[in-house]
Image: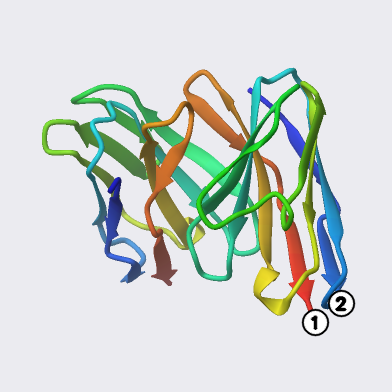
């Protein structure tokens, strides 16, 4: 199993600012995933982050808006840049271990 | 296009009743995942179904997988209020380790 922590757990931000979300895993993992979950919706994959390489972004998400760092096998950050109210969501960090996918507690972001 | 369809999307039921949530998918995946999400919380893994005919049970929840029909079911027996949550199913996508998610079923169980 994997235990994942995220910081911050929630934040209220002003339009036009940026927020960096941290994700820490208690074991080394190859792939880390960043998801967005808008209110009342399912999960949408933002990007897959491998250590030592550029993140792979899904359609509709770009590096300038959601830059990701993956400096080692247990840590990643996601930055939400130049925020607008449409970015208000829960952001979830996730890792895969064999047949299980584990999720962090999420970061609830509100943009005003 | 890879799709995962859940139904119903919303279910309100009385305690003590039985009901089934359905998850149809379009991929050729042999693996299917069920998660539970409480309001304002993250996702909790309920079941991982790894092959055709797999059946898993935990308490009042039982999940099954028919890969030929590309269908999984999550059956709730004698529902209790504590099972109120949103339930998601997901399958492996084409890319390594990416999951394709259903829309979720919001389950409300009334006393």
Could you tell whether B87 is left or right of A27 in the image?
left
Which residue carries the number 2 mark? A14
Q: Is residue A101 above or below residue A59?
A: above
Which residue carries the number 1 mark? A112
How much space separates mark 1 and mark 2, taking CA atoms? 5 Å
Residue B109: image quadrant is bottom left
Residue at horizontal 33 percent and vertical 23 percent from the top: B50
Please tell me the numbered disc located at residue A1.
Answer: none
- Crowd tier of the residue under label 1, counting other residues whose Cα lies within 10 Å: few below 14, some 14–19, many 20 or above: some
Q: Is residue A98 above or below residue B74?
A: above
Residue at horizontal 71 percent and vertical 78 percent from the top: A85
Spot occupied by residue A34 in the image (x, y as percentages of width and height): 65, 44
Question: In terms of secondary structure, where does tag 2 sit?
Answer: loop
Residue A74: image quadrant is top right
Spot occupied by residue A103 in the image (x, y as percentages of width and height): 63, 40
Could you tell whether B96 is left or right of A20 in the image?
left
The colour scheme is rainbow
Residue A101: image quadrant is top right
Residue nearest the observer in this picture, B97 or B76: B97
Q: Quadrant of the N terminus of chain A?
A: top right
- How many numbered marks does the figure carry? 2
């Amino acid at each position: 199993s994997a235990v994942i922590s995220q910081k911050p757990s929630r934040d209220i931000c002003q339009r036009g600012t940026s927020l960096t979300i941290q994700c820490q895993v208690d074991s080394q993992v190859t792939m880390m995933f960043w998801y967005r979950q808008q209110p009342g919706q399912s999960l949408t994959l933002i990007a897959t982050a491998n250590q030592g390489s550029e993140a792979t972004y899904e359609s509709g998400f770009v590096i300038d808006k959601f830059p990701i760092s993956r400096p080692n096998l247990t840590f990643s950050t996601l930055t939400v840049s130049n925020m607008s109210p449409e970015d208000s969501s829960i952001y979830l960090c996730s890792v895969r271990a064999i047949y299980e996918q584990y999720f962090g507690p999420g970061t609830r972001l509100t943009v005003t | 296009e890879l799709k995962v369809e859940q139904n119903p999307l919303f279910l309100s039921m009385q305690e003590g009743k039985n009901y089934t949530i359905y998850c149809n998918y379009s991929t050729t995946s042999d693996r299917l995942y069920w998660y539970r999400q409480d309001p304002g919380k993250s996702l909790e893994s309920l079941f991982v179904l790894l092959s055709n005919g797999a059946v898993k049970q935990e308490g009042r929840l039982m999940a099954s997988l028919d890969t030929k029909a590309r269908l999984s079911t999550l059956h709730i027996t004698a529902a209790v209020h504590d099972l109120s949550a949103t339930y998601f199913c997901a399958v492996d996508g084409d890319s390594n380790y990416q999951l394709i998610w259903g829309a979720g079923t919001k389950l409300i169980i009334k006393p």
